[in-house]
């Protein structure tokens, strides 16, 4: 298996970038993306970091449309982690305003595209204006039954797992749940992806941009058997060709889930 990396500014034709992408082949039902590189994209252009975040939101709009038209069912985007509060105050303030601007301008297009918005994370700690924008977007797209655009906002996987453990422990204490019945499904029901049908909860493909090869506290339980794809493209430069290249790589993987395929059993 070979991971393909892309220089941040070079443009690719479909023939060069998609390397055997098959539109009739397997399309991941759930793609999760760690959107990394906004700050570096801006710094490379001698712009303030917030300019990169703004451009990154434009990329979100484009990739959402591309994923939807390719047949992806769930697109989970790591927008703001529980650790991102450590960033400079002005940057955090700007990041908390981004969902407001994003949803106010993009929701009509999402409705047209039949995309449903969901947000997972500790929303109660977000500023009131951010919470209001999120709530409006969820309500306005609630009737859509196409792609689920799932933002991980103020999300951290370790915190998510701890919260799930506490909920399960409380249910056991209240005699609503027997210890011996706790299994993968029960745990999954208590995680923040539990709102999804069971077959869609775990991303089949996880993409990280910017060249970093870390998971960064993202969906630690859910990505147990996910295919990982790393690209050097910074998030604002990530386009349809990069998305197709990631999916093409997925199409070439031999997904055994710990077992053997038919050829290996012979």
Image (spheres, helix red, strand yellow):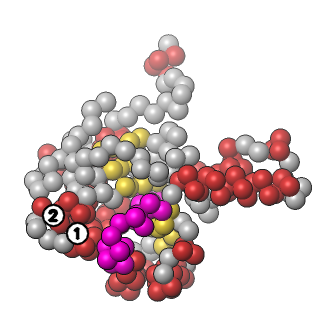
Extent of the magenta region: 72-95
- Give the percent coordinates (x, y) of residue 10: 10, 53
Residue extending farthest right: 175
Q: Is residue 152 above or below residue 137?
A: above
How far apart, in angstroms, are the residues tagged by discs 2 and 1?
A: 7 Å
Residue at 81% across / 57% down in the picture? 171
Answer left or right for 260 relative to 163: left
- Give the percent coordinates (x, y) of residue 148: 48, 66
Answer left or right for 139 relative to 61: right
Q: Is residue 194 visible?
A: yes
- Give the percent coordinates (x, y) of residue 185: 69, 47
Residue 85, quarter of the rendered image: bottom left
Residue at 31% across / 73% down in the picture? 91
- Give the percent coordinates (x, y) of residue 55: 23, 71
Answer left or right for 185 relative to 248: right
Please tell me whether residue 74 belongs to the stretch shown in magenta.
yes
Residue 240, quarter of the rendered image: bottom left
Q: Residues within 10 Å of mark 1 (few under 14, many from 20)?
A: some
- Rendered-image quadrant of the N terminus: top left
Please tell me whether residue 75 belongs to the stretch shown in magenta.
yes
Q: Is residue 136 visible?
A: no
Residue extending farthest top: 266
Say the numbered circle drawn on residue 49. 1
Residue at 35% across / 50% down in the picture? 207
Determine contact: label 2, label 1, CB under 8 Å: yes
Q: Of helix, strand and loop, which one carries label 2?
A: helix
Say the numbered circle drawn on residue 260. none
Residue at 48% across / 62% down in the picture? 82
Which of the two labelled residues, at mark 2 and mark 1, occupies the earlier sequence position?
Answer: 2
Q: Which residue is mark 2?
A: 43
Figure label count: 2
């Amino acid at each position: 298996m070979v991971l393909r990396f892309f220089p941040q500014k070079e443009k690719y034709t479909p023939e060069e970038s998609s390397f055997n992408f098959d539109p009739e082949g397997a399309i991941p039902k759930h793609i999760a993306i760690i959107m990394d590189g906004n700050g570096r994209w801006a710094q490379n252009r001698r712009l303030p970091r917030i300019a990169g975040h703004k451009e990154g939101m434009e990329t979100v709009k484009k990739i959402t449309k591309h994923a939807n038209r390719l047949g992806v069912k769930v697109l989970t985007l790591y927008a703001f982690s529980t650790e991102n509060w450590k960033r400079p105050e002005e940057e955090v303030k700007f990041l908390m305003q981004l969902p407001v601007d994003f949803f106010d301008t993009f929701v009509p297009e999402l409705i047209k595209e039949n995309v449903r918005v969901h947000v997972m994370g500790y929303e109660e700690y977000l500023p009131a204006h951010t919470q209001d924008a999120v709530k409006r977007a969820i309500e306005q797209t609630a009737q859509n039954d196409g792609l689920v655009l799932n933002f991980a906002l103020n999300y951290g996987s370790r915190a998510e797992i701890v919260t799930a453990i506490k909920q399960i422990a409380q249910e056991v204490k209240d005699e609503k749940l027997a210890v011996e019945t706790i299994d993968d499904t029960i745990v999954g029901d208590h995680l923040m992806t539990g709102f999804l049908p069971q077959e869609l909860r775990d991303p089949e493909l996880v993409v990280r941009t910017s060249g970093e090869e870390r998971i960064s506290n993202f969906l630690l339980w859910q990505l147990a058997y996910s295919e990982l794809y790393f690209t050097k493209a910074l998030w604002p430069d990530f386009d349809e060709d990069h998305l197709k290249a990631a999916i093409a790589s997925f199409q070439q993987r031999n997904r055994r889930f710990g077992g053997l395929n038919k050829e290996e059993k012979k």
